Amino acid sequence: MQETLHLSSYSTSSFSLPKPSISPPKALKSTTISFPPHPKPPTPISPQLSSATSLPPPPPPPPPTTSPNFQLQEKLLFLDSLGIDSFHCLTSHSLIISSSLSDLKSIIDFLYSINLTILDIRRVLHMCPDILTTPLSSILRPAVTFLLREAHVTGDNLPFVLRRRPRLLTKSVEQNLRPTLYFLQSTIGIEDVSKCATLLSCSVETKFIPRLDYFLRIGFSRRDAKVMFRRFPSLFCYSIEDNLEPKFDYFVVEMGRELKELTVFPQYFSFSLEKRIKPRHRMCVEKGVCLSLPVMLKSHESRFRDRLDVCCSSSMPYQTLS
């Protein structure tokens, strides 16, 4: 049959399927998730940068509380807080550097306990900064006990004695205070040493004996010399070269007086030679009057002149003994 299709004839034809109008999708690329990089550490500031961009240096660390400078500062501040001149104490007595703050506080408390006021403490420590480093149990307490029990200083009078002679608190009872007490009582014959308790801080060998020997050399008997010191114990405090010698020379050479007048009135040595003794003696000489030493020296200026006028109005000059 002619209409029969012979498909075999198409086997060699160039017939091909039509290409689709939509191209197939391209192959998907493999996807990866990326994270942002780690931040870099800040670049240190170069020392070559200008000062405007450089950071300020960190503050210095506080000084350790155990450093010597810090401890000294604490002690000075403590003294200053009480109104005590810490600079004077430190420069006068450098051993304060080695003492502890607790020791200083204990000594201040002790001074309060014996009825010293803060004004007394300031005066006492200014006169004798050594007290701040004096051992409390072995020196300070025994000294106060000695003054109260053996020297018979009353509790009310103790602050007055210490204000005048604070060095009493720094003296050893066995080596200083008790030997001086025995000398004043037994050798000189002073019965109530409490009235001259300030002398207890003096040395018998370097203070008392040289002055007693001086009066023996210038003509007084031992008995009369003791009488003078018993009547006026402050003689032990006067300088031989600056006080006793020039006043005694004027008394003998210029005034022409007798030694027994000094035995009766040893207080003569307590008056100023230039301001009291010489001017009044010259006035007596000008008026032709001879007054006793107490009348001439103890009286106030107006009373002294009145006494001269009374003597001059008499028929003849005379010596008054009272």
Image (cartoon, helix red, strand yellow):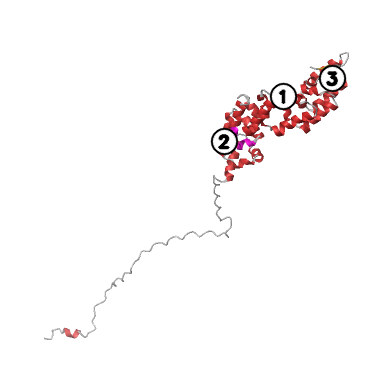
Q: Is residue 13 left or right of residue 191?
A: left
- SS of the residue at dot 2? helix
Rendering coords of residue 22 (x, y %):
28, 72
Identify the mark at residue 124; answer none if there is no mark: none
Q: Are marks 3 and 2 in contact (CB under 8 Å)?
A: no
Identify the mark at residue 290; answer none if there is no mark: 3
Identify the mark at residue 230; answer none if there is no mark: 1
Query: What residue is disc 2 on?
Result: 105
| Res 253 → quadrant | top right
Q: Badge 2 local density, few (<14 within 10 Å), some, or many (20+)?
A: some
Q: Given the image, on which type of amino acid does mark 3 rest?
A: Cys
Q: Is residue 125 left or right of residue 38?
A: right
Report, in whole angstroms, how far the alpha carbon at label 2 lies from the one at label 1. 41 Å
Report, in whole angstroms, how far the alpha carbon at label 1 lies from the one at label 3. 27 Å
Residue at (76%, 24%) from the top-left corner? 224
- SS of the residue at dot 1? helix
Q: Which contiguous range is marked in magenta?
A: 129-140
Report, in whole angstroms, how far the alpha carbon at label 3 lies from the one at label 2. 59 Å
* Label 1 vs label 3, nearer the camera: 1
Rendering coords of residue 285 (x, y %):
87, 22
